[in-house]
Image: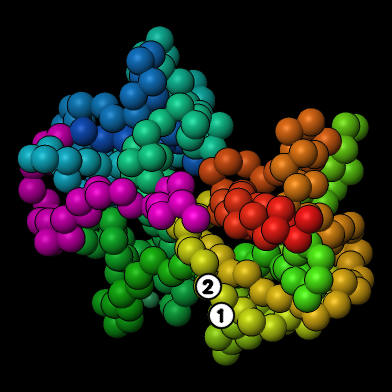
Amino acid sequence: MKAVQYYSNTGFDRAPHLRKKEGEVFTGKTIYLWKGKIFTDHKGSPFVPFTGKESALSDRLFFLGCEGHSEILCTDLSHLEDGILGHFTGKGSFYDLREIAHRLSRKDAAVLAYAKGLAEWNAGNAFCGTCGHSTRSLERGHSRICANASCARIIYPRIDPAVIVLIEYRPENGEPLCLLNRVKTSDGYRCSTFAGFVEVGESLENAVVREMKEEVDVDVKHITYVASQPWPFPSSVMIGFTAEVKTTAFCVDNEEIKDAAWYSAKEIRELAASGQLVLSKSDSIARSLIEHWVENNECVESKVR
Ligand SMILES: [Zn+2]
């Protein structure tokens, strides 16, 4: 399994001690965001030298961390209409992060995902959930406080955990199989693992059992943690597991899941190579779970034969 999933922090220094330095003069580089999209210049760099003008947007300017002695900030320009973005015209363009992730280093992709998630959390919490007054940014974007003095509630970013599960069947004799969620395409199928949000009052394992029962009506055992991945689109963390079933019987719920099928490692590899099976995008933990399973189970298969 890949040690570091896409969008995971690969050594970026978040420098949390500098979040308290509110109101100081910023130096360094900023990432510009507009309505969820990331600005990159003509050379493809998302890190733009900080001009100082951004300080006027104090409620939309967030501190991410440091790269050496340079602070890395994020400026959310989502309040601007298309026409007012003229400053950027000719200097570069705004892109969806997942469209450009493959062109970026793992480290840069992780910083941009972090920026996007933090900006979206701030934008979505402009009002207090307790009293309805407006809130303002604290700790350079890492918390917010209600402007109503009699409330003064402080809120912090919330993360929505989701489990993502590769279901496998390991017969005593014969090749192991894994169950994939699939959608018909013109050439074959698009396949993925199963996923769902953790509910209030559940452990991660509880969520795995419930979600797999709901989506494909299977009873899973031997739930094993594999890896996790930040997924700030807008605010999740994906926790990846494998889980075993004792029979190959299943029944899709026809709501979230329309179709599913069992595949051996060899079938996945061959069908993916021929284009008849398109796996989840390469930046997803679903893809990592499937590739990891195929790598580990091709050996078992060859021993069986
Ligand atoms: Zn309040």
Q: In this picture, is 14 found above or below 81?
A: below
Q: CA distance from mark 1 to mark 2?
A: 10 Å
Q: Nearer the viewer, mark 1 or mark 2?
A: 2
Q: Dividing the picture into quarters, in which one does residue 167 lie?
A: bottom right
Labels 1 and 2 touching (C-beta < 8 A): yes
| Mark 2: amino acid | Tyr
Q: Quadrant of the C terminus?
A: bottom right
| Residue occupying image coordinates x 55% and y 85% | 203
- Say which of 289 and 106 sits in front: 289
Picture coordinates of residue 186, whole percent (x, y): 90, 32
- Say whether residue 96 is left or right of residue 23: right
Q: Residues within 10 Å of mark 2 (few under 14, many from 20)?
A: some
Q: Which residue is mark 1?
A: 204
Sequence-wise, the earlier of marks 1 and 2 is: 1
Magenta span includes 164? no
Residue receiving disc 2: 225
Residue that protrudes farthest toward the bottom in the picture:
201
In depth, the one of 288 and 102 nearer the eye is 288
Q: Residue at x 64, y 82 (%)?
A: 222
Q: Is residue 151 visible?
A: yes
> Residue 188: which quarter of the image?
top right
- What's the residue type where badge 1 is placed? Leu
Provide residue 226's location: percent of width, then percent of height.
52, 67
Q: Is residue 214 visible?
A: no
- The correct choice, above or below, for 184 with respect to 241 in the image is above
x, y percent for residue 185: 87, 37
For label 1, the SS is helix
The magenta region covers 1-28
Q: Could you say where residue 113 lies in the image, as x and y percent from the top left? A: 42, 46
